[in-house]
Image (cartoon, grey):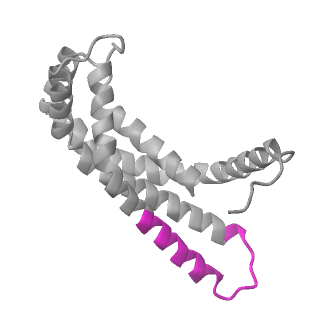
Amino acid sequence: MRAKLLGCLLMTTIAMASVATAQTTANSPVDATRPAAARKLFVLLKVGDRAGKLVDQVFGAVSDAALKQTLSTTSSNDPNFGERQRRLALVKKTEETALMTEIMPQMIDAMITVYARDFTVDELNAATAYYSSPAGQAFLSKQPMVLREVTQTVLPKLMPMVQKRAADIEAKMQAAVADLPPPPKN
């Protein structure tokens, strides 16, 4: 679960970061105007609202795809297997969404800090100007639909590969520590 949550966090951060591109200026000192310019951009972009919707879409699509994959590839003599899996998926999705909602303000503050460090005030203002323009507004209004389409078409195709790799990674992790004694019991 932790790996999926971190993966979803990473996807969310990448998706939100894609709304503006500019030359990195990591070595530039951060003055007080940069965070304000970054926050202005984030308010215009409705990053909190969009991130919440994106997280819900991603968690929903991942959960739905994982459930479909589990139900279609797992045989069980448990007559309640399907219902059990649906209920577990619902609890997982609900709790992960609640967690993301809880941590979203800290995540946005951290992102603003990074934007303020990596973009100049001029770059942030240019991004704000673009997203305030008709083309920028069209991009913003169409982006959720495009992301939903991508999520609905791409994730189901990639889910089997992701699940296989997760199992491979877990096996490699276990092999990496197999020679160590077990941790002490509390």
Q: Position of residue 137 (x, y in %)?
A: 17, 37
Residue 139, picture quadrant: top left
When the figure is inspected, residue 33 is found, relative to residue 144, above or below; the finding is above
| Quadrant in which the N terminus appears | bottom right
Is 75 in the magenta?
A: yes
What secondary structure characterizes most of the magenta part?
helix
Asked if residue 136 is positioned above or below residue 64 in the image, the reply reads above
**Which residue does the image show at 25% across and 47% down from the upper left?**
48
Residue 11 picture location, percent across and down: 46, 42
- Displayed quadrant of residue 45: top left
Task: Residue 72 in the image: state x and y as whole percent.
Answer: 67, 69
Q: Quadrant of the C terminus?
A: bottom right
Please state the horizontal and vertical placement of residue 2, each as a whole percent of the image: 56, 54
Magenta stretch? 72-95
Q: Nearer the viewer, residue 29 or 25?
A: 29
> Does residue 3 appear left or right of residue 46 in this picture?
right
Asked if residue 52 lies in the magenta stretch, the reply is no
**Foreground: 170 or 68?**
170
The number of discs equals: 0
Quadrant in the picture for residue 115: top left
> Residue, x 63% and y 49% (percent of image)?
162
Side of 150 relative to 31 (left or right): right
- Residue at figure coordinates x 51%, y 57% from the top left: 62
- x 33%, y 13%: residue: 25
For this orientation, the residue located farthest to the right is 179
- Front-most of residues 139 and 67: 67
